[in-house]
Amino acid sequence: MASNTKAPTKIVGYARCSTSGQTTAVQVAELKKAGCSVIFQESISTRVKEDDRPELQKALAALEPESELVLTTLSRIGRTQLEVIQRLHDLQEKGIHIRTLDGLVNTKGLGKFAPVLIGLLSGINQVERELIRERTLESIQFRREHNGDLGGRPKTSEAKAGLVLRLRKDGYSYRSIREQTGIALQTIRRIIKEDETN
């Protein structure tokens, strides 16, 4: 006789910290208390793309419909607000629940209202992007009208550029030049390259 007992929800935790000087220990402890049956963790920069985060990929691969992804905060699953909201939307579409331990999101608890929350967050994100774009355009227009600086790379003084070239001609490495002058490696390379092409 077939059992009508429903299988327990699979709860997957994901912990991330951004630098090697930090640890995920506190996050992992919180995720264990939250009932996670399996936890993936990694120490990786927020600048690293999602595809290059192996433990995040494993966590996402472990999820299936009706399972739950638990995080300490939403910031753990994306580099930007847009990425985070897109991830929420994708998981919701697959029937996967998301819960954050800071209390911000619990799609399982929201039930049929979960898509409304994701939609609301998406709308807020769109509004924010439009406001940022509008403020940027207004700032550019204002500076144009008032002969302001439109930004860009600051010019290196001729004296510093000359010092870079002299040190390079004396056989110093790029790193040694950087240490002696305080100029960024990228700027040092540009100065030397421009001198070679002139």
Image (cartoon, rainbow, N blue to C red):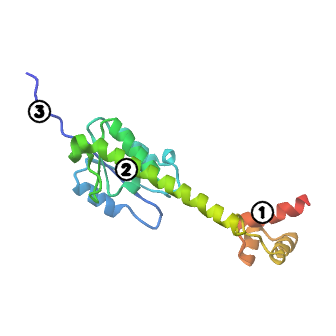
Residue at figure coordinates x 22%, y 42% from the top left? 111
Viewer-proximal residue, 4 or 88? 88
Residue 67 visible at all: yes
Residue 33, given in percent of the width and then of the height, sits at: 22, 57
Per the image, the residue denoted by label 3 is 5
Per the image, the residue denoted by label 1 is 189
The reply to whether dot 3 and dot 2 touch (C-beta < 8 Å) is no
Q: Earlier in the sequence, mark 1 or mark 2?
A: 2
Residue 133 shown left or right of residue 102 in the figure: right
Q: Earlier in the sequence, mark 3 or mark 2?
A: 3
Q: Amino acid at mark 3?
A: Thr
The reply to whether dot 3 and dot 1 touch (C-beta < 8 Å) is no
Viewer-proximal residue, 133 or 174? 133
Query: Which disc is residue 121 wearing?
Result: 2
Circle 3 sits in a helix, a strand or a loop, which is it? Answer: loop
Circle 2 sits in a helix, a strand or a loop, which is it? Answer: helix
The extreme top residue here reads: 1
Q: Residues within 10 Å of mark 3 (few under 14, many from 20)?
A: few
The extreme right residue here reads: 198
Q: Amino acid at mark 2?
A: Leu
Residue 19 shown left or right of residue 31 in the figure: right
